[in-house]
Image: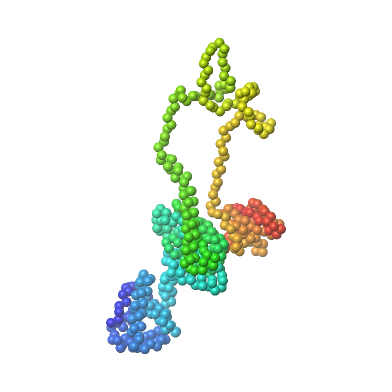
Amino acid sequence: MIPSSGVPVSARMRPTDAYFELIADTLDGLESSARAQFLQRFLLALAHVEIPESKTIALWDEILARRVQLSERADSPVALHTALVDVLSSSGMFNVPVVLEYDELKNLHRNAVTDPLTGLYNRRLFNENFDKELNRARRYAHPLSLVTLDLHRFKEVNDKHGHPRGDEVLRAAATTLKKALRTSDSAFRIGGDEFALLLPQTDSFQASGLSRRIGVVFTETLRPLDLMVSVSMDHGISTYPQDGDQRDQLIRIADERLYSAKQASNRKTVAEAAPDIAHDVAAEAPQQVAPEMPREVAPEPTPPSEPVPSAVPETSQDVQAPPPAPPAPAPPLPPAPGAAVPESVAPPLPSTPPVSPLQTSRPTFPLAIEEPRIFTVPRKAERVSMAGTNAYAVLGDQSSHRARVVDLGFGGVALDFSSTEGIPDTLLAVLHVPILPPVRVSLKRVWTKQLSEDTVRVGCCFVS
Protein backbone atom coordinates (compact mmCIF):
# COMPACT_ATOMS: atom_id res chain seq x y z
CA MET A 1 0.00 0.00 0.00
CA ILE A 2 1.12 3.55 -0.68
CA PRO A 3 1.58 5.49 2.58
CA SER A 4 -1.09 8.04 3.24
CA SER A 5 -0.02 11.64 2.94
CA GLY A 6 -1.62 12.54 6.24
CA VAL A 7 -2.47 16.03 4.96
CA PRO A 8 -6.11 17.17 4.89
CA VAL A 9 -7.35 18.15 1.46
CA SER A 10 -9.26 21.39 1.10
CA ALA A 11 -12.74 21.19 -0.37
CA ARG A 12 -11.93 24.12 -2.66
CA MET A 13 -8.81 23.25 -4.66
CA ARG A 14 -7.33 24.62 -7.83
CA PRO A 15 -7.72 22.44 -10.93
CA THR A 16 -4.04 21.44 -10.85
CA ASP A 17 -4.27 20.38 -7.21
CA ALA A 18 -7.41 18.34 -7.86
CA TYR A 19 -5.72 16.65 -10.84
CA PHE A 20 -2.78 15.46 -8.74
CA GLU A 21 -5.03 14.32 -5.91
CA LEU A 22 -7.04 12.26 -8.41
CA ILE A 23 -3.82 10.63 -9.63
CA ALA A 24 -2.82 9.80 -6.05
CA ASP A 25 -6.19 8.22 -5.33
CA THR A 26 -6.05 6.20 -8.57
CA LEU A 27 -2.54 4.88 -7.87
CA ASP A 28 -3.66 3.80 -4.42
CA GLY A 29 -5.93 1.14 -5.97
CA LEU A 30 -3.48 -0.26 -8.55
CA GLU A 31 -1.19 -3.24 -8.26
CA SER A 32 2.54 -2.65 -7.91
CA SER A 33 3.42 -3.49 -11.52
CA ALA A 34 0.67 -1.30 -12.98
CA ARG A 35 1.49 1.48 -10.56
CA ALA A 36 5.20 1.41 -11.53
CA GLN A 37 4.39 1.42 -15.24
CA PHE A 38 1.99 4.38 -14.86
CA LEU A 39 4.44 6.40 -12.76
CA GLN A 40 7.24 5.88 -15.29
CA ARG A 41 5.13 7.29 -18.12
CA PHE A 42 3.66 10.03 -15.94
CA LEU A 43 7.07 11.37 -14.84
CA LEU A 44 8.40 11.13 -18.41
CA ALA A 45 5.51 13.24 -19.70
CA LEU A 46 5.67 15.68 -16.78
CA ALA A 47 9.40 16.36 -16.47
CA HIS A 48 11.02 14.57 -19.42
CA VAL A 49 12.78 12.29 -16.94
CA GLU A 50 13.25 8.57 -17.65
CA ILE A 51 13.15 6.57 -14.43
CA PRO A 52 13.30 2.75 -14.26
CA GLU A 53 10.03 1.12 -13.20
CA SER A 54 11.79 -0.46 -10.23
CA LYS A 55 12.55 3.02 -8.77
CA THR A 56 9.34 4.88 -9.51
CA ILE A 57 7.38 3.55 -6.50
CA ALA A 58 10.17 4.49 -4.08
CA LEU A 59 10.32 7.98 -5.66
CA TRP A 60 6.56 8.38 -5.28
CA ASP A 61 6.74 7.36 -1.61
CA GLU A 62 9.43 10.03 -1.13
CA ILE A 63 7.15 12.64 -2.72
CA LEU A 64 4.31 11.76 -0.33
CA ALA A 65 6.65 11.93 2.67
CA ARG A 66 8.04 15.30 1.52
CA ARG A 67 4.50 16.64 1.31
CA VAL A 68 3.99 15.86 4.99
CA GLN A 69 7.25 17.55 5.95
CA LEU A 70 6.48 20.71 3.99
CA SER A 71 2.97 20.89 5.42
CA GLU A 72 4.28 20.66 8.98
CA ARG A 73 6.92 23.30 8.31
CA ALA A 74 4.48 25.72 6.69
CA ASP A 75 1.79 24.94 9.30
CA SER A 76 -0.75 24.60 6.46
CA PRO A 77 -1.61 21.96 3.83
CA VAL A 78 0.78 21.86 0.87
CA ALA A 79 -0.29 20.74 -2.59
CA LEU A 80 0.95 17.38 -3.82
CA HIS A 81 2.46 18.79 -7.01
CA THR A 82 4.54 21.22 -4.91
CA ALA A 83 6.12 18.31 -3.07
CA LEU A 84 6.70 16.57 -6.41
CA VAL A 85 8.50 19.61 -7.82
CA ASP A 86 10.58 19.93 -4.64
CA VAL A 87 11.74 16.30 -4.75
CA LEU A 88 12.56 16.29 -8.46
CA SER A 89 14.34 19.67 -8.37
CA SER A 90 16.43 18.80 -5.28
CA SER A 91 17.51 15.50 -6.86
CA GLY A 92 18.46 17.19 -10.13
CA MET A 93 15.91 15.26 -12.22
CA PHE A 94 14.17 18.28 -13.72
CA ASN A 95 15.38 19.01 -17.22
CA VAL A 96 12.45 20.60 -19.03
CA PRO A 97 9.59 21.03 -16.55
CA VAL A 98 6.18 21.20 -18.12
CA VAL A 99 3.73 21.57 -15.23
CA LEU A 100 5.22 23.71 -12.46
CA GLU A 101 3.86 25.90 -9.68
CA TYR A 102 6.86 27.98 -8.68
CA ASP A 103 4.95 30.54 -6.62
CA GLU A 104 4.00 28.11 -3.91
CA LEU A 105 7.50 26.62 -3.85
CA LYS A 106 9.02 30.09 -3.51
CA ASN A 107 6.63 30.89 -0.71
CA LEU A 108 7.75 27.80 1.15
CA HIS A 109 11.39 28.76 0.82
CA ARG A 110 10.60 32.33 1.85
CA ASN A 111 8.66 31.18 4.90
CA ALA A 112 11.55 29.00 5.98
CA VAL A 113 13.91 32.00 6.28
CA THR A 114 11.52 34.89 6.97
CA ASP A 115 9.86 36.17 10.13
CA PRO A 116 6.09 36.13 9.40
CA LEU A 117 5.27 39.21 11.53
CA THR A 118 7.87 41.70 10.29
CA GLY A 119 8.92 40.25 6.93
CA LEU A 120 12.59 40.39 7.98
CA TYR A 121 14.95 37.45 7.73
CA ASN A 122 14.96 35.15 10.77
CA ARG A 123 17.77 33.99 13.03
CA ARG A 124 18.45 30.88 10.96
CA LEU A 125 19.37 32.92 7.90
CA PHE A 126 21.24 35.41 10.10
CA ASN A 127 23.76 32.75 11.10
CA GLU A 128 24.16 31.54 7.51
CA ASN A 129 24.60 35.02 6.04
CA PHE A 130 26.97 36.08 8.80
CA ASP A 131 29.37 33.27 7.94
CA LYS A 132 29.19 34.11 4.21
CA GLU A 133 29.76 37.83 4.73
CA LEU A 134 32.59 37.16 7.18
CA ASN A 135 34.34 34.90 4.67
CA ARG A 136 33.91 37.55 1.97
CA ALA A 137 35.31 40.24 4.28
CA ARG A 138 38.38 38.09 5.01
CA ARG A 139 38.91 37.34 1.31
CA TYR A 140 38.80 40.96 0.14
CA ALA A 141 40.11 42.62 3.34
CA HIS A 142 36.94 44.71 3.77
CA PRO A 143 35.38 45.77 7.07
CA LEU A 144 32.12 44.17 8.19
CA SER A 145 29.95 45.66 10.91
CA LEU A 146 27.33 43.92 13.01
CA VAL A 147 24.65 46.03 14.70
CA THR A 148 22.40 44.46 17.31
CA LEU A 149 19.29 46.46 18.25
CA ASP A 150 16.77 46.24 21.06
CA LEU A 151 13.52 48.15 21.68
CA HIS A 152 13.71 50.07 24.95
CA ARG A 153 10.51 49.85 27.11
CA PHE A 154 8.82 47.54 24.60
CA LYS A 155 7.38 45.36 27.39
CA GLU A 156 5.51 48.40 28.75
CA VAL A 157 3.79 48.78 25.39
CA ASN A 158 2.40 45.25 25.62
CA ASP A 159 1.37 45.81 29.25
CA LYS A 160 -0.40 49.15 28.67
CA HIS A 161 -1.64 48.87 25.07
CA GLY A 162 -1.86 45.12 24.47
CA HIS A 163 0.03 42.77 22.19
CA PRO A 164 -1.65 43.90 18.93
CA ARG A 165 -0.23 47.38 19.44
CA GLY A 166 3.11 45.78 20.32
CA ASP A 167 3.02 43.99 16.96
CA GLU A 168 2.52 47.37 15.28
CA VAL A 169 5.64 48.66 17.02
CA LEU A 170 7.63 45.66 15.78
CA ARG A 171 6.40 46.21 12.23
CA ALA A 172 7.31 49.90 12.50
CA ALA A 173 10.83 48.91 13.54
CA ALA A 174 11.10 46.51 10.58
CA THR A 175 9.86 49.21 8.18
CA THR A 176 12.48 51.63 9.50
CA LEU A 177 15.27 49.08 9.05
CA LYS A 178 14.22 48.21 5.51
CA LYS A 179 14.23 51.86 4.45
CA ALA A 180 17.61 52.51 6.02
CA LEU A 181 19.61 49.74 4.36
CA ARG A 182 21.50 49.46 1.10
CA THR A 183 21.03 46.58 -1.31
CA SER A 184 24.10 44.82 0.10
CA ASP A 185 22.91 45.18 3.74
CA SER A 186 20.65 42.71 5.54
CA ALA A 187 18.21 43.09 8.44
CA PHE A 188 17.08 40.24 10.70
CA ARG A 189 14.68 39.69 13.56
CA ILE A 190 16.63 37.42 15.89
CA GLY A 191 14.30 37.48 18.91
CA GLY A 192 11.13 38.98 20.34
CA ASP A 193 12.14 42.66 20.18
CA GLU A 194 15.75 42.06 19.09
CA PHE A 195 17.05 42.84 15.63
CA ALA A 196 20.40 42.62 13.86
CA LEU A 197 22.01 44.28 10.85
CA LEU A 198 24.87 42.98 8.70
CA LEU A 199 26.66 45.87 6.98
CA PRO A 200 29.36 44.77 4.50
CA GLN A 201 32.16 47.25 3.71
CA THR A 202 31.10 49.42 6.66
CA ASP A 203 33.42 50.55 9.46
CA SER A 204 32.38 51.28 13.04
CA PHE A 205 32.04 55.05 12.47
CA GLN A 206 29.67 54.57 9.54
CA ALA A 207 27.71 51.91 11.42
CA SER A 208 27.35 54.22 14.41
CA GLY A 209 26.03 57.06 12.25
CA LEU A 210 23.54 54.75 10.56
CA SER A 211 22.33 53.41 13.92
CA ARG A 212 21.70 56.91 15.28
CA ARG A 213 19.76 57.90 12.16
CA ILE A 214 17.69 54.72 12.44
CA GLY A 215 16.83 55.61 16.04
CA VAL A 216 15.67 59.11 15.05
CA VAL A 217 13.53 57.89 12.15
CA PHE A 218 12.06 55.11 14.29
CA THR A 219 10.92 57.65 16.89
CA GLU A 220 9.14 59.65 14.20
CA THR A 221 7.61 56.50 12.72
CA LEU A 222 5.98 55.72 16.08
CA ARG A 223 4.30 59.13 16.46
CA PRO A 224 1.07 58.14 14.63
CA LEU A 225 0.61 55.24 17.09
CA ASP A 226 0.13 57.75 19.94
CA LEU A 227 1.73 55.53 22.57
CA MET A 228 1.73 56.28 26.29
CA VAL A 229 5.27 54.88 26.47
CA SER A 230 8.31 56.48 24.87
CA VAL A 231 9.83 53.57 22.93
CA SER A 232 13.36 53.97 21.59
CA MET A 233 15.96 51.77 19.94
CA ASP A 234 19.25 50.86 21.66
CA HIS A 235 22.14 49.48 19.63
CA GLY A 236 25.49 47.78 20.03
CA ILE A 237 28.15 47.57 17.31
CA SER A 238 31.09 45.29 16.59
CA THR A 239 33.29 45.47 13.51
CA TYR A 240 35.58 43.03 11.75
CA PRO A 241 38.58 42.94 11.99
CA GLN A 242 39.34 45.25 14.97
CA ASP A 243 36.79 43.64 17.31
CA GLY A 244 37.42 40.05 16.23
CA ASP A 245 37.48 37.67 13.28
CA GLN A 246 34.98 35.02 14.43
CA ARG A 247 31.19 35.16 14.33
CA ASP A 248 30.63 34.24 17.99
CA GLN A 249 33.21 36.78 19.14
CA LEU A 250 31.64 39.63 17.15
CA ILE A 251 28.15 38.72 18.38
CA ARG A 252 29.35 38.68 21.99
CA ILE A 253 31.01 42.10 21.75
CA ALA A 254 27.98 43.64 20.04
CA ASP A 255 25.69 42.19 22.72
CA GLU A 256 27.91 43.57 25.51
CA ARG A 257 27.80 47.05 24.00
CA LEU A 258 24.06 46.76 23.51
CA TYR A 259 23.71 45.84 27.19
CA SER A 260 25.71 48.92 28.20
CA ALA A 261 23.48 51.10 26.02
CA LYS A 262 20.37 49.57 27.61
CA GLN A 263 21.73 50.27 31.09
CA ALA A 264 22.35 53.91 30.13
CA SER A 265 18.81 54.17 28.76
CA ASN A 266 17.39 52.69 31.96
CA ARG A 267 19.28 55.23 34.08
CA LYS A 268 18.03 58.03 31.85
CA THR A 269 14.45 56.77 32.15
CA VAL A 270 14.70 56.63 35.95
CA ALA A 271 16.17 60.15 36.06
CA GLU A 272 13.37 61.51 33.89
CA ALA A 273 10.72 59.80 36.02
CA ALA A 274 12.22 60.94 39.35
CA PRO A 275 10.39 64.34 39.50
CA ASP A 276 7.03 62.68 38.82
CA ILE A 277 7.67 60.03 41.45
CA ALA A 278 8.69 62.66 44.00
CA HIS A 279 5.56 64.66 43.20
CA ASP A 280 3.35 61.60 43.68
CA VAL A 281 5.04 60.72 46.97
CA ALA A 282 4.66 64.28 48.24
CA ALA A 283 0.99 64.31 47.27
CA GLU A 284 0.31 61.05 49.10
CA ALA A 285 2.34 61.92 52.22
CA PRO A 286 0.35 63.24 55.22
CA GLN A 287 0.59 66.97 55.76
CA GLN A 288 2.65 67.69 58.88
CA VAL A 289 1.82 70.97 60.65
CA ALA A 290 4.60 72.59 62.68
CA PRO A 291 3.63 73.07 66.35
CA GLU A 292 2.95 76.64 67.43
CA MET A 293 5.74 78.11 69.56
CA PRO A 294 4.91 79.84 72.88
CA ARG A 295 4.72 83.60 72.75
CA GLU A 296 7.43 84.08 75.33
CA VAL A 297 9.82 82.06 73.21
CA ALA A 298 8.91 83.36 69.79
CA PRO A 299 9.09 87.18 69.81
CA GLU A 300 7.05 89.02 67.24
CA PRO A 301 8.99 90.69 64.46
CA THR A 302 9.16 94.47 64.41
CA PRO A 303 6.75 95.95 61.85
CA PRO A 304 8.43 97.93 59.07
CA SER A 305 6.45 101.09 60.01
CA GLU A 306 7.97 101.30 63.52
CA PRO A 307 11.25 103.17 63.98
CA VAL A 308 14.34 101.11 63.95
CA PRO A 309 15.78 100.78 67.47
CA SER A 310 19.13 102.37 68.13
CA ALA A 311 22.15 100.17 68.04
CA VAL A 312 23.27 101.61 71.50
CA PRO A 313 20.91 100.83 74.45
CA GLU A 314 19.65 103.87 76.41
CA THR A 315 20.26 103.90 80.19
CA SER A 316 19.20 106.32 82.96
CA GLN A 317 21.42 107.49 85.79
CA ASP A 318 18.42 108.02 88.15
CA VAL A 319 17.15 104.49 87.90
CA GLN A 320 19.54 101.78 88.92
CA ALA A 321 18.18 98.94 86.89
CA PRO A 322 20.03 95.74 86.42
CA PRO A 323 21.53 95.37 83.02
CA PRO A 324 19.21 93.57 80.65
CA ALA A 325 20.04 90.07 79.53
CA PRO A 326 21.92 90.05 76.27
CA PRO A 327 19.52 89.37 73.41
CA ALA A 328 19.93 86.46 71.06
CA PRO A 329 22.38 87.23 68.28
CA ALA A 330 20.62 88.68 65.28
CA PRO A 331 21.83 90.07 62.00
CA PRO A 332 22.72 93.79 62.29
CA LEU A 333 20.00 96.14 61.14
CA PRO A 334 20.86 98.89 58.69
CA PRO A 335 20.84 102.46 60.06
CA ALA A 336 18.19 104.93 59.05
CA PRO A 337 19.04 107.05 56.05
CA GLY A 338 21.22 109.98 57.10
CA ALA A 339 21.71 108.76 60.69
CA ALA A 340 25.21 108.88 62.14
CA VAL A 341 26.48 105.62 63.52
CA PRO A 342 29.27 105.60 66.15
CA GLU A 343 32.48 104.02 64.94
CA SER A 344 32.53 101.72 67.96
CA VAL A 345 29.26 100.21 66.94
CA ALA A 346 29.27 100.31 63.14
CA PRO A 347 30.87 97.18 61.68
CA PRO A 348 33.55 97.58 59.05
CA LEU A 349 32.00 97.88 55.61
CA PRO A 350 33.34 95.68 52.83
CA SER A 351 34.79 97.36 49.80
CA THR A 352 32.10 97.80 47.17
CA PRO A 353 32.29 99.03 43.60
CA PRO A 354 31.25 102.66 42.99
CA VAL A 355 27.51 103.18 42.61
CA SER A 356 26.27 104.90 39.50
CA PRO A 357 23.90 107.88 39.81
CA LEU A 358 21.08 105.75 38.46
CA GLN A 359 21.37 103.42 41.45
CA THR A 360 21.23 106.08 44.19
CA SER A 361 17.47 105.82 44.54
CA ARG A 362 17.61 102.09 45.22
CA PRO A 363 17.94 100.77 48.82
CA THR A 364 21.52 100.18 49.86
CA PHE A 365 20.83 97.44 52.39
CA PRO A 366 21.28 93.83 51.36
CA LEU A 367 18.29 92.05 49.82
CA ALA A 368 17.46 88.36 49.84
CA ILE A 369 17.70 87.65 46.12
CA GLU A 370 16.72 84.19 44.93
CA GLU A 371 19.10 82.55 42.53
CA PRO A 372 17.66 82.44 38.99
CA ARG A 373 16.36 79.03 37.96
CA ILE A 374 17.32 77.83 34.53
CA PHE A 375 14.83 75.72 32.62
CA THR A 376 15.98 73.74 29.63
CA VAL A 377 13.74 72.29 26.98
CA PRO A 378 15.14 68.98 25.68
CA ARG A 379 15.32 68.38 21.97
CA LYS A 380 12.74 66.16 20.39
CA ALA A 381 15.67 64.19 18.97
CA GLU A 382 19.40 64.65 18.73
CA ARG A 383 20.98 66.47 15.85
CA VAL A 384 22.22 63.73 13.53
CA SER A 385 25.61 64.09 11.93
CA MET A 386 25.83 63.41 8.20
CA ALA A 387 29.61 62.91 8.30
CA GLY A 388 30.76 60.08 6.08
CA THR A 389 27.66 60.21 3.89
CA ASN A 390 26.91 61.82 0.55
CA ALA A 391 24.06 63.94 1.93
CA TYR A 392 23.54 67.15 -0.02
CA ALA A 393 20.98 69.85 -0.70
CA VAL A 394 19.90 71.21 -4.09
CA LEU A 395 19.16 74.91 -3.77
CA GLY A 396 16.37 76.52 -5.74
CA ASP A 397 15.49 75.11 -9.14
CA GLN A 398 19.07 74.75 -10.32
CA SER A 399 20.37 71.23 -9.82
CA SER A 400 23.94 72.48 -10.22
CA HIS A 401 23.68 74.76 -7.17
CA ARG A 402 24.35 72.39 -4.29
CA ALA A 403 25.58 72.43 -0.71
CA ARG A 404 26.83 69.65 1.56
CA VAL A 405 24.56 68.67 4.47
CA VAL A 406 26.64 68.67 7.67
CA ASP A 407 23.99 67.66 10.18
CA LEU A 408 20.22 67.49 10.40
CA GLY A 409 17.61 67.87 13.12
CA PHE A 410 13.90 68.49 13.51
CA GLY A 411 14.47 72.21 13.78
CA GLY A 412 16.89 72.85 10.98
CA VAL A 413 19.96 71.88 9.03
CA ALA A 414 23.59 72.97 8.72
CA LEU A 415 25.03 73.38 5.21
CA ASP A 416 28.55 73.93 3.86
CA PHE A 417 28.92 76.36 0.94
CA SER A 418 31.94 77.42 -1.04
CA SER A 419 30.70 81.01 -0.76
CA THR A 420 27.68 82.85 0.63
CA GLU A 421 27.39 85.10 -2.40
CA GLY A 422 24.01 84.79 -4.09
CA ILE A 423 22.41 82.93 -1.18
CA PRO A 424 19.33 84.81 0.11
CA ASP A 425 18.17 84.84 3.72
CA THR A 426 15.27 82.53 2.82
CA LEU A 427 15.44 79.87 0.14
CA LEU A 428 13.88 76.66 -1.08
CA ALA A 429 15.94 73.46 -1.09
CA VAL A 430 15.60 69.74 -1.68
CA LEU A 431 17.42 67.61 0.92
CA HIS A 432 18.94 64.32 -0.24
CA VAL A 433 19.73 62.22 2.84
CA PRO A 434 20.57 58.48 2.59
CA ILE A 435 17.88 57.29 5.01
CA LEU A 436 15.07 59.54 3.73
CA PRO A 437 13.46 60.20 0.35
CA PRO A 438 14.18 63.64 -1.18
CA VAL A 439 12.43 66.28 0.94
CA ARG A 440 11.54 69.79 -0.26
CA VAL A 441 11.93 72.34 2.53
CA SER A 442 11.89 76.10 3.03
CA LEU A 443 14.95 77.39 4.91
CA LYS A 444 15.82 80.61 6.69
CA ARG A 445 19.42 81.54 7.37
CA VAL A 446 20.13 81.89 11.11
CA TRP A 447 23.92 82.09 11.42
CA THR A 448 27.03 81.99 9.23
CA LYS A 449 30.56 80.87 10.10
CA GLN A 450 33.69 81.02 7.91
CA LEU A 451 35.50 77.72 8.36
CA SER A 452 38.22 78.22 5.76
CA GLU A 453 38.95 80.21 2.64
CA ASP A 454 36.68 78.04 0.51
CA THR A 455 34.14 76.75 3.06
CA VAL A 456 31.35 78.67 4.77
CA ARG A 457 28.97 76.94 7.15
CA VAL A 458 25.42 78.24 7.30
CA GLY A 459 22.86 77.23 9.92
CA CYS A 460 19.27 77.28 8.71
CA CYS A 461 15.93 76.68 10.38
CA PHE A 462 12.88 75.16 8.76
CA VAL A 463 10.01 77.55 8.07
CA SER A 464 6.51 76.68 6.99
Vertical placement of 142 versus 233: above or below?
A: below
Vertical placement of 410 versus 365: above or below?
A: below
At a point 41% along the width and 36% down the height, the residue shown is 287
What percent of the width, then of the height, locates residue 93?
Answer: 42, 84
Which residue is more in the foreground, 298 or 64? 298
What percent of the width, then of the height, locates residue 129?
Answer: 48, 71
Which residue is more in the foreground, 306 or 1? 306
What percent of the width, then of the height, locates residue 382?
Answer: 55, 54
Residue 181 can be seen, yes or no: no
Which residue is more in the foreground, 46 or 277? 277
Q: How is the image coloured?
A: rainbow
Q: How many marks?
A: 0
Which residue is more in the foreground, 334 or 376? 334
Residue 416, quarter of the rendered image: bottom right
At a point 47% along the width and 58% down the height, the residue shown is 259
At a point 49% along the width and 59% down the height, the residue shown is 257
What percent of the width, then of the height, locates residue 211?
Answer: 53, 60
The reply, left or right, for residue 28 in relation to residue 419 is left
The reply, left or right, for residue 428 in relation to residue 271 is right
Residue 371 can be seen, yes or no: yes
Quarter of the picture holding the N terminus: bottom left
Residue extending furthest top? 318
Vertical placement of 73 versus 27: above or below?
A: above
